[in-house]
Amino acid sequence: MKRPTAALFAAFAVATLALAPAIAEARVGGRFSSGSRGSQTYTAPPATRTAPSGGQQFQRTETPAQRPGTAATPQTAQRPVGATGGFFSRNPLMAGLMGGLLGAGLFGLLSGAGLFGGLSGFAGFLGLMLQIALIAGLVFLVMRLIRGRQQPALAGGPAGYARDMNPGGRPAGGSPMGGGAFGGAGGVVRRPIEIGAADFEAFERNLVEMNEAWTRQDVAALRRLSTPEMARYFEQDLEDLKARGWTNATRDVKLEAGDLSEAWHEDGQDYATVAMRFSLVDVTTDAAGKVVEGSPTERETATELWTFTRRPGTRWTLSAIQQTG
């Protein structure tokens, strides 16, 4: 029994190493594309100098998908808002692992060799677990490498919004923000709006305050700084971390560069999508204080598209975060 026991421990060790990092990436927004951009939720934001590759499609949104001339229907692929979701829905690699084991067991039963007879006994079962865990780990590493290569390189030294914007709110390399009304999805009428220096200062302040509130796990502050939809995502992400006994902290957030993607008004709301490249210290630790991911001393750089919204005359709040690439 010594060899099967040793193999069992080895299999679980490899599985842990392969799967843990995939769910440990947890900075503000969980590195997902989440939220809503009004009628532009399903339209990619224009590329900018800071984010030349544009933004990814939303993985989490409450905005129903709508085709021209049809009634709005919920996005079927999204997780129900406010629900925790099943373990396997949040951890697709584990779902694949268990699916493979179940398939092997059914094969053994159909062949008359017992539940795991199709794997040549218990040792074969453990061997399959080890192989699947190793494959999962390799797939994860490849995806991390691909995503790392897609991350835009830091261009020069620190730069604020003012260095990437022309007077009058024209995005660098983009289209003028002046002009008449234009159409949005579902027949919504949009009109462009001007974004000034005070607005960009508010966006940068929100970036810093949001990360501070996230690190403190200050739900009240997260609700004040973001829309109810985004606040629900943040609360769910914090709960998921807590369930694993992990804590994520981001500090020393510094905006390196930023520019405007688009800004408009529709249905009584102002919207502004801005590309932001920022550096920060991002570290996730377990209950014993051991580092799970990131570094408590080394800085990392991220580029994301943040969308803010407000009623005219009120403060900007965060309504969406989109990953780039």
Image: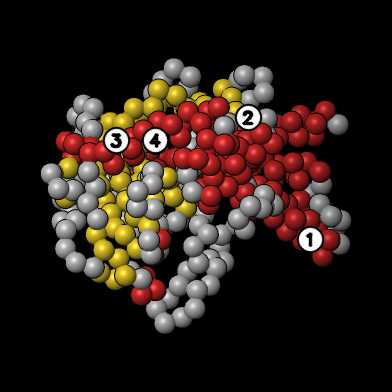
Marks 3 and 2: CB-CB under 8 Å? Answer: no
Q: What is the C-alpha distance between the residues marked 2 and 4?
A: 23 Å
Residue found at the very far front of the displayed protein: 313
Q: Which residue is mark 1?
A: 106
The image shows residue 189 at horizontal and vertical percentages of 31, 70
Q: Which residue is mark 3?
A: 201
Residue closest to the eye, 284 or 84: 84
Which residue is drawn at the image coordinates 23% and 33% (left, top)?
Answer: 160
Decide which of tag 4 and tag 1 comes sooner along the chain: 1
The secondary structure type at the circle numbered 4 is: helix
The secondary structure type at the circle numbered 3 is: helix
Residue 303 placement, left or right of 247:
left
Q: Nearer the viewer, mark 2 or mark 4?
A: 4
Q: Is residue 28 visible?
A: yes
Q: What is the C-alpha distance between the residues marked 3 and 2?
A: 33 Å
Q: Nearer the viewer, mark 4 or mark 1?
A: 4
Q: Nearer the viewer, mark 1 or mark 2?
A: 2
- Residue 207 - label: 4
